[in-house]
Every structure is written in C-alpha cells, then in structure tokens.
Image (cartoon, rainbow, N blue to C red):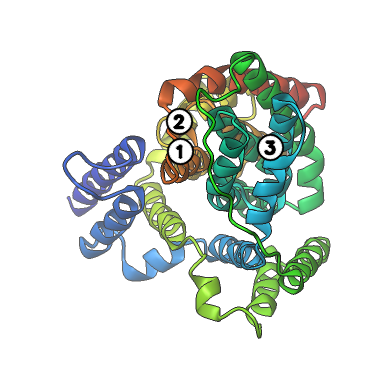
Amino acid sequence: MTETVDTGLILTIFVLTYVGMALGRFPGLRIDRTGIALLAAILLAVSGAVTPPAVVEAIDFPTLFILFGLMILSAQYDASGFYDWCSLKISGFGRSPVILLAYTVGAAGLLSAILANDVVVFAMTPLLCLGIRARGLDPRPYLIGLAGGANAGSAATMIGNPQNILIAQLGDLDFWPFLAACGVPALIGLIACHATIWLVWRGRFQAALIDGDSLPAIRLDRGSLIKALVGTAALLALFAAPLPHAIGVLIIAAALLVSRRVATRQMLDKVDWPLLVLFAGLFVVTAALETTGLPADAVAMLAAAGLSPDRLAVLLPVSLIGSNTIGNVPAVILLLAVWPDLSAQTLYGLAILSTLAGNLLIIGSLANIIVVERAKSVGVTLGFIEHARCGVPMTLLSLAGAGLWLWLTGLMPL
C-alpha cells in the first residue's frame, strides 16, 4: 500500500512539475520554473517519497560544478567589459543592414560556443539594442539574430548551453569529438538563421523613427580580458587531458576567483543561481520518477512499438515538441530519465536537435526569453508572432540540415 501511495504521489508531483515547466508559472502565483522545481523537490523530501540521502544522490553535482565554473569564466569576461565592447563593436560594423545582421548572428554563435548562450545574450542584449537604434535601424530582427545565433552556435560544443553540458556529463563525452559531430549542424543553423531573418525582414530593417540614443563609453580592462582569455585557453587544454571535466572547470574557476581587481562577491553575483537550483530540483523529480519503475516500463513499450530514440524519425519530433512546450533543459532531463544509457551518437543527436529546436518559439529556450526581457528593459518590444515568423522557418531549415548531416555521417538512421 505504501508503495502504491508513494507512486501516486510521485507521479502527481512529477506531472504538476512539468505542467509548470510548460506554463512557466502557476496561474495566480509568482512562482517561476525554478521555484516550481525547488518546491517539487521539497515536497518529495518532506513527504518521505524520497529520503534525504536519495535527494543528495539524485543531484548530478559534476554537471552543476561545470555550469558554475563556466559562469565564473563568463563573469571574468563581463568584469573586463568584453561583452559591452562586443555589443557596441557589432552595432558599428558593416555599412548595410544585411552585413550587420551577419556580424550579429556570427558573433553570438561564436561566443556562445565557448561562453554559454544564456550568459552571452544576457550581457549583450541591452547595448546591442542601443547601438542599433543609434544607427536608425529596427533592433527587432537583430535581436532575433542574437538569440537564434546564440542557440545555433551553442549546439556546436558540450559547454555551449546547459542541456549540452548535462548530456556530455552523463554520457562521458569529450570536447573535441563532440565538436566534430555537432559543429557542422551548428554552422547550418547559423546560416539558416541569417538567411531566414534577411528574407523575412528584407526592405524593413530601417526604423520608423531614428532614435538618438546616447551610447555609453566602454572601457575595456585589458588585464582582466587577458586573464579571461588565458583561462579559456587553459580550459580547452584541460578538456583534452585525462581529467574529469568538472575538476578541470573548477580549477579554472578557482584560479579566476583569485584576483586583485575583481571582488569575489562581484564574480559570484554573475552566477545564475536560479538555473543551478532548477537543475537540482529537476534531478530530484526525475530520480523519484525512476524509483516507480514507470520510465523502464515506458522504454519497454516504446521499444515494442519500434520507437527507438536512436532514429531521427523519433528523436527529431520529440526534441521539437519537448523544447517548445516544457523547454529544452527540462525536456532533456526528462528524456535522459526515460531513455537511459543512450549511445554517444544518439546523445550527439539529442544535443543538436534539442538546441536547434529551441529557436522555434520564444518559449523554446531560455536564451530567447532572456533576449526578450532584456530588450524590454531598454524600451524594445519583441512580440511572440514577430519572433515566430523567423523562428519557425529557421528552425525547420536548421533541423532539416542537421538531420541530413546526422544521417549522411551515419550518426543516426532515419
């Protein structure tokens, strides 16, 4: 009887948690996705459905350590003024709007491949808006390009976004083979992003009114930037060494925290603590579901029906739907719980498809949401439909290209 009650309770909490992930919050409450995941983990613990030792065991600390370390590395870049400098430099590049759009998409993709997409768009969005408006251009297509480029570029590496970090950690994947498998689809995604926005917005890049925004003077701290660049180079070298990824990232983070210029508190203020808590809460929720045996039953049923995740016909639509309902991070955590022990080739496919699928709608990825909210803070509104006009075709094109790559290289069958 106890087992039946626990199963019912766990299933109820699980369903409510992922409904909350899809809605973003519960109606009438200010609790967001992080709060929902944390509350679910607490309810599972206090109800006895999951014991305190099981809660600790469920949390994948190496994944959280990697996320934390990369956030510290990004904080070092931010402290140097690098992101603000990039934003203003990008907005000043190119004489034509099409060239400026190419710089925006390309820079977002390149930076996100190493420094994680969410952090890049958070730092760059406001000043990019101001710089583009100062040129008399409409910021909205460039904001779509910033988010789309960041998502597409982040698909290239195992440290480009949170879901890739999780996939690589659980699958024990290495940096350079990951890049070899995922780099080309990421490039396809960047090209699809630029081409789609140019076609949809052609002839409409000029703003209705030239906004005379005054641009702040940006001072680039070369000493802090050099430290960040050395840290990045050292991190890439450590990824090639026979050392656990989490240990390598923490070594770099510890070295960056030792500073005479930047206070520790200033660095820690740049860490996205809510994202870390979201991961921890979802780890507990999905681990609780595994104890019911339902994921194993689901795997058996899917296998009997011939629905294997190592096939594009299954993984592509699942990634597309999951990323644009509950979000790509929760979707990946859920899929890895339902389909454990996936091959490296399937994990590469999951990383590529779930990331590129996030460009479909604003709710598809956290990077999209961050761009919209940060743009709103400087008076630029990017609507759901405006984004979807570009997001839908760019996503379908990039997923088609990625699927073709995965099939032609033999990574995944149709």
Q: How many other residues sit within 10 Å of disc 2, few (<14), some (14-19) or many (≥20)?
A: some
Residue 236 location (% of width, % of height): 79, 61
Q: Nearer the viewer, residue 266 or 211?
A: 211
The residue under label 1 is 372
85 above or below 97? below
Give the Cα distance between marks 3 and 1: 16 Å
What is the three-letter code of the residue carrying label 1? Val
Q: Is residue 206 left or right of residue 10?
A: right
The residue under label 2 is 382
Q: In this view, does 200 lie to the left or right of 9?
A: right
Q: How many other residues sit within 10 Å of disc 3, few (<14), some (14-19) or many (≥20)?
A: many
Q: Nearer the viewer, residue 81 or 349?
A: 81
Quadrant of the drawing holding the C terminus: top right
Decide: marks 1, 2 in contact (CB < 8 A)?
A: yes
Q: In this view, does 4 lie to the left or right of 387?
A: left
Residue 386 location (% of width, % of height): 47, 22
Residue 104, numbered label: 3
Quadrant housing residue 257: bottom right
- Identify the residue shown where x is 74% and y is 37%: 182
Label 1 secondary element: helix
**Residue 308 visible to the viewer:** no
Mark 3 vs mark 1: which is more N-terminal?
Answer: 3
Residue 59 location (% of width, % of height): 46, 62
Give the Cα distance between marks 1 and 2: 6 Å
329 above or below 191? below
Label 2 secondary element: loop
Label 3 secondary element: helix
Q: Which of 259 and 2 is in front in this view?
A: 259
Mark 1 vs mark 2: which is more N-terminal?
Answer: 1
